[in-house]
Image (tube, grey):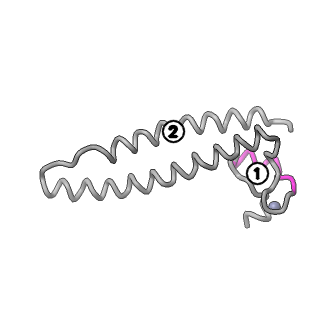
């Protein structure tokens, strides 16, 4: 497929970025809390936000890894739901997608 190399490079760059962010989140979450009660309360709120951000990041990492493995096995660009070809415009917009625009509905 044309542009596949370009898309693969985009996915790999994105994966690098996400892995970097995930380890930052990890560090933030595991940092020991302050002794001060009020600061602790604020920190656990921050932790919740970070944990959510972490979930989203993990999810995207997972999707990108799947996309890269589909590229490796030659299934990339095929809708996993109906089996039709996903348009290049859609793949460029959302490189980690595995469904066509109809199935994503
Ligand atoms: Zn489909």
The one nearer the camera, 93 or 41, is 41
Give me the residue at 27% from left, 43% from top: 31
Crowding near pointer 2: few (<14 within 10 Å), some, many (20+)?
Answer: some
Q: In the rendering, at what x and y percent does residue 75 appear?
A: 81, 46
- Work out how far the residue at label 1 is from the one at label 2, CA to CA, in angstroms: 24 Å
Q: In the rendering, at what x and y percent does residue 22 appear?
A: 46, 42
Q: Earlier in the sequence, mark 1 or mark 2?
A: 2
Relative to 5, say whether 49 is above or below.
below
The one nearer the camera, 92 or 59, is 59
Task: Say which mark, if any, is on residue 16.
Answer: none
Relative to 94, say whether 24 is above or below.
above
Q: Which residue is mark 2?
A: 19
The residue mark sitting in front, 1 or 2, is 2
Q: Residue furthest bottom?
A: 105
SS of the residue under disc 2: helix
- Report if the beta carbon of the residue with label 1 is closer than 8 angstroms to ligand 1: no
Give me the residue at 52% from left, 49% from top: 58
Give me the residue at 67% from left, 47% from top: 66
Q: Quadrant of ligand 1?
A: bottom right
Q: In the rendering, at what x and y percent does residue 33 appear?
A: 21, 49
Q: Which segment did they paint magenta?
A: 84-94
Task: Say which mark, if any, is on residue 90.
Answer: 1
């Amino acid at each position: 497929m044309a542009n596949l190399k370009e898309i693969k490079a985009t996915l790999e760059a994105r994966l690098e970025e996400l892995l970097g962010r995930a380890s930052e989140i990890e560090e933030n979450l595991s940092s020991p809390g302050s002794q001060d009660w009020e600061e602790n309360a604020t920190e656990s709120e921050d932790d919740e936000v970070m944990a959510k951000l972490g979930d989203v990041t993990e999810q995207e990492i997972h999707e990108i890894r799947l996309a890269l493995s589909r590229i490796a096995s030659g299934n990339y660009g095929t809708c996993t739901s109906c089996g039709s070809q996903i348009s290049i415009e859609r793949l460029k917009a959302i490189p980690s997608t595995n469904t066509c625009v109809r199935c994503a509905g």
